[in-house]
Every structure is written in structure tokens, then in C-alpha cells.
Amino acid sequence: MFNFFNSAGNSQNSFFSGLNFADYASIRNGSYNKLMKAYYAKNDSSGSSGSSSAGTRKAGEKNYWDYNEKIKNAPKKEYNYWNYNEKIKGESSPGKKFADIANAASSVKSSADAMEKAGEITYEAVSGYVNKYNELVQAAKNSSNAAINSSMRSISDYTKSNEKALAAIGITMDGKGGLKIDKNTFQSASSESVDALFKGSNSYGAKVGSRAAAILSTAKYQAGKYGITDTASAGSSSTGSSSSTGSTSAGSTTQTPSASGGQLSVIRSDSSRLAETAGRLASGSGALYKTDDEGNYDTDAVYDAVSSFVKQYNATVESAGKSNVAAIKYASLASMTDSTKANRSKLAAIGITIDSGSKTLTLDKEKLKEAGVEKVKELFTGGYGKTVNDRASAISSHANHEINKGGMYSSSGIYNYNVKSAFSAFQ
């Protein structure tokens, strides 16, 4: 057919010198490919006595056709988050890992809550807390979830910032993120020093419990993606009110995140502004409470800050209340509104009342001015301002995490788990 075959013994002829347009067309339509394959298959079968079939070659020998077939018919290999963890990282399943984190977080929160309500905090109670804290650190180790990692960093930061106070009652960090407790040191410590760490809305125990609740919520939601809806943590306290879908637990796995990145952006913006204003009001040594040479406050600046706080608080309650992200609505937001409710009488003393239905605030500016700056300072620097700052920051962090997932929500609001995103998190 081609000069290529007719001039096999003529070294002066080449494949390209005999190629014409008809030959070129045969290459394009694939007939040349088939002819060459048949030609070499025939030569293989009739060649040396050491070769008995077209498929027999020396070990390791390859030819073009093998390579070509492998490229065209490459074996399909399915990779996903589950088998990546199982085969590469040696974990049984990510669903179980999230369930383990949820259970450990639930135990830490329950332990912190129990000490908050206890009359006398015993060594057994604190030792139990230390063990459960260490279980959470171990369970959340190497977590790929940004929200969980953020909350774990907060817990670690709270622990480090209270390092001296904890050491005074026998609790020290072990260098790997865990805790150790010395019984003799604890028993020689005063009950007041123990209570200062584990009692009160602004205590170390309360802050760790709040972050553990956020971890519980996120971990339960993530576990639910793998069909695990019961993480054996039903005994943890609920922090949320009933929702439109009928779920009341803080870590409901029946909830799906808000579909709209725009709505999440609003939540992030509202809560960030609230966190900033609450932080200013909570800072007793900050510029807001500076006095002039005669000891007078800049009352207008303080009252404006309170007015902004009320507006930003209401905006956050409204926008975050529309979210179906469990960590936003049923953990951080619920904890913030609970703290506000607990300070109802102090807020009322400076002219701020709470709407029992919407949980928003109303400010009476005349009553605020009558109360004066000292009462404002007493309320916000006494723990309430720091609590709102902390919870609003958590809302903003969770909203930012959901936004950064990118492409994981359909335009109709249906949540689609992005396998590639989860896989790439390990790259």
C-alpha cells in the first residue's frame, strides 16, 4: 500500500518521501494505525523461534501499542475523602473521627458545666476535666476542619493565658497540648483559686466550655455527612432554641448550612463589627474610658459606643438567626444571647432591655445618661463585654469558614459535599 513497505530494502527511500495525500488521510482516519498494528503483530508471530505469540516479549520490554492502549484505556481509580483517610492516613473513616471529636467535646463541656454548678469543686471533678480535656486534644489532633481547629486554638490560648492560675492549683501543660494535675498541689490550693478558674461566665472553665460546645456542634454536623447522626453525646446541654426544621440541639446534624454566600458575608460583617465594639467597651484601660485632667469621661464617646453596640448586636442576632449553620446559630449565637439574658438586670440599669421574642435589644438613651459612665464600665468590663466579643468573634470565624469552602452550595440552597475540597485539604 505504501512505499514504506515496497522499499523495505532500499535505504535511500524513507517513509516521508513516499507519503502522499491519500496516505496522510489514512493516518488521519486511523486505517494506518490498524495496518501498522497488524503488520507488527504478524512479524511478532512469525519472527524468531524464541517468540511463540504476539504477546510474548522479554521481561520489561514495552512497545508503542501497549503504551497506546494503556493511555486510551487507563484503569479508573476512584479517590474520595473516605478512602484517602483509610488508605493513606490509616483512619477507619472520617465520619467516625468527627463522632469521636463530638463525644470528647461533649465530655469537656459537661465537665465544665458540672463544676460551674457545683457547690465545692473536688479534686475528682478537676482530675476528670483534665482527662476529658486530653481526650479532646487527642481526638481533634490532625483535624482537617478549619472551624474545629480554630476552636481548639482558642481553647489552647485560654489555657496558656491562665497558665499561672492553673499551676497554682496543680494543673500544668505537658508540652503536647495536654494537661497534667498534681494531687498534692491541688489539695493545698484554696477553694477560692479553684472557683476563680471554673466558676463564673467569664472564667477559664466557661470559655473552654463555650469553645467545646462550638466544636461539638461542628463535629456532629460533619459526622452527619457520613450518616452518623447519633454521636452518643445526647447528654450534652442544648444551647439552641427550636428551629424551623424542628431541631433543638446545639449540634443538630439535620441542619444544612445557609446556601447564600451573600448571607454569610452579612453575618460575618455584622458579627465582626459587634466584636470590635464589644471589645472596646470591655477594655477597662482602653481609650474609651480615658478621663481628662479633671477626671471627667468623654461621655458622648461612651454613649455612642453603647448605642453602636445595641445596633450591631441586633443586626448580628437578626442575620445569624437566619443561618442554618449549626456552629453559628446553635452554639455561638445561642451562647451570646444566653449571656445577655443572664445580665438582664445589669443591662436594664443602663437603659437596655431585651425583647423576649426576638432577643434583640432596645436602648433608652435618657436612662443611659442617667446611669452614667461608671455603670456602663462596670457592666462591660465585668465580663459581659468580653463574652459578647468572644461569641461574636466565633460567629464571624464560622461564617468566614463557610464562605471559604467555596462552591459547596448549589444556587437552590442544597448542600453538596465537595469531595475534591476535602481531599485537597491534605495535599
Image (cartoon, grey):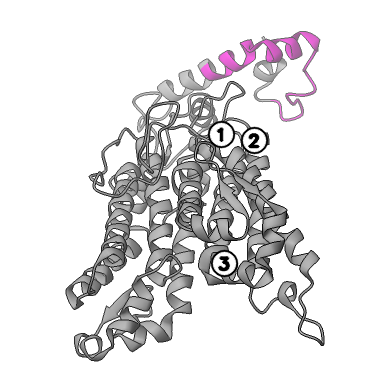
User: Measuring 38% from the left and 78% from the top, which residue is drawn there?
Assistant: 196
Label 1 to label 2: alpha-carbon separation: 9 Å
Residues marked 1 and 2 touching at CB (< 8 Å):
yes
Q: Which residues are magenta?
A: 10-37
The kind of residue tagged 2 is Gln
Q: Is residue 328 visible?
A: yes
**Residue 233 at x, y = what percent?**
26, 47
**Closer to the camera, 107 or 353?**
353
Relative placement, left or right, of 66 versus 380 is left
In the rendered image, residue 19 lying in the magenta stretch gets the answer yes
In magenta segment, residue 12? yes
Dot 2 corresponds to which residue? 263
Camera-nearest label, 3 or 1: 3
Q: Position of residue 400 (x, y in %)?
A: 61, 48
Q: Amino acid at mark 1?
A: Lys
Whichever of labels 1 and 2 marks the residue nearer the N terminus, that label is 2
Instruction: Name above or below for residue 327 compared with residue 110.
Output: above
Q: Which residue, given by chain and number where applicable, does mark 3 sit on?
A: 379
Residue at 42% across, 26% down: 245
Q: Secondary structure at mark 2?
A: helix
Count residues near mark 2 (Cα–Cα under 10 Å), then give few for <14, some for 14-19, many for 20+: some
In the picture, measured across the screen, residue 15 lies left or right of residue 155, that is right
Q: Residues within 10 Å of mark 1 (few under 14, many from 20)?
A: some
Q: Is residue 384 above or below residue 325?
A: below
Q: Amino acid at mark 3?
A: Leu
The residues bearing labels 3 and 1 have C-alpha atoms spaced at a distance of 29 Å
Residue holding disc 1: 322
Q: Secondary structure at mark 3?
A: helix
Vertical comparison of 272 with 79: above or below: below
